[in-house]
Image (tube, rainbow, N blue to C red):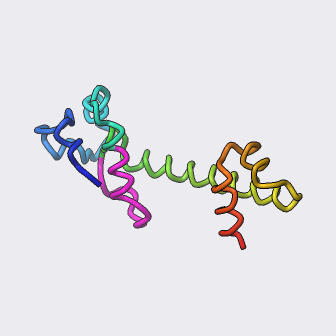
Amino acid sequence: MSLDWMTAAVCAGVDPELWFPETGDSRPARICQGCPVRQQCEEYAAVLEGDCGLPYRHGVWGGTSAKERAAARDQASTLKDGRDAQILRLAEHGVGPKEIASLVGVTTRTVHRVKQHAA
């Protein structure tokens, strides 16, 4: 993953301690609001945090706190689990992969992957 985007970050040169606030300091979020690389920054935080079990360790990235990113990951995981369950229910009822993909809003590859993972 290239980190070239960091040179365009609005926060370059800002005191690093600001990105690890102990309280609800809103300055980091305000600085991030107009940043042209905000999305890349938040995505990089997700890569750093991954599935390591320490979701609160990396401070503010892309205008979001580690706690906010962890909550978003949890929500996305819950949505994915619900989607996968729906795919499996439809498959159990004999619905074909193309129709499942159309009904659920995924690709047929995703349908096959979910079914294969469940087997």
Residue 117, x across and y down, in percent: 65, 69
From the viewer's side, name the closer residue of 40 and 19.
Answer: 40
**First to last magenta residue range:** 42-59
Residue positioned most to the bottom: 119
Tell me where residue 42 sits by quadrant. top left
Determine the residue positioned at 69% across, 51% down. Answer: 83
From the viewer's side, name the closer residue of 60 and 81.
Answer: 81
From the viewer's side, name the closer residue of 103 and 33.
Answer: 103
The answer to whether 12 appears left or right of 50 in the picture is: left
Residue 77, x across and y down, in percent: 58, 54
Considering the image in quadrants, where does the C terminus appear? bottom right
Residue 118, x across and y down, in percent: 70, 69
Determine the residue positioned at 64% across, 56% down. Answer: 109
The answer to whether 98 appears left or right of 13 in the picture is: right
The answer to whether 75 appears left or right of 66 in the picture is: right
Residue positioned most to the top: 34
Tell me where residue 68 sits by quadrant. top left
Magenta stretch contains residue 47: yes
Magenta stretch contains residue 111: no
From the viewer's side, name the closer residue of 103 and 67.
Answer: 103
Residue positioned most to the right: 93
Considering the image in quadrants, where does the N terminus appear? bottom left
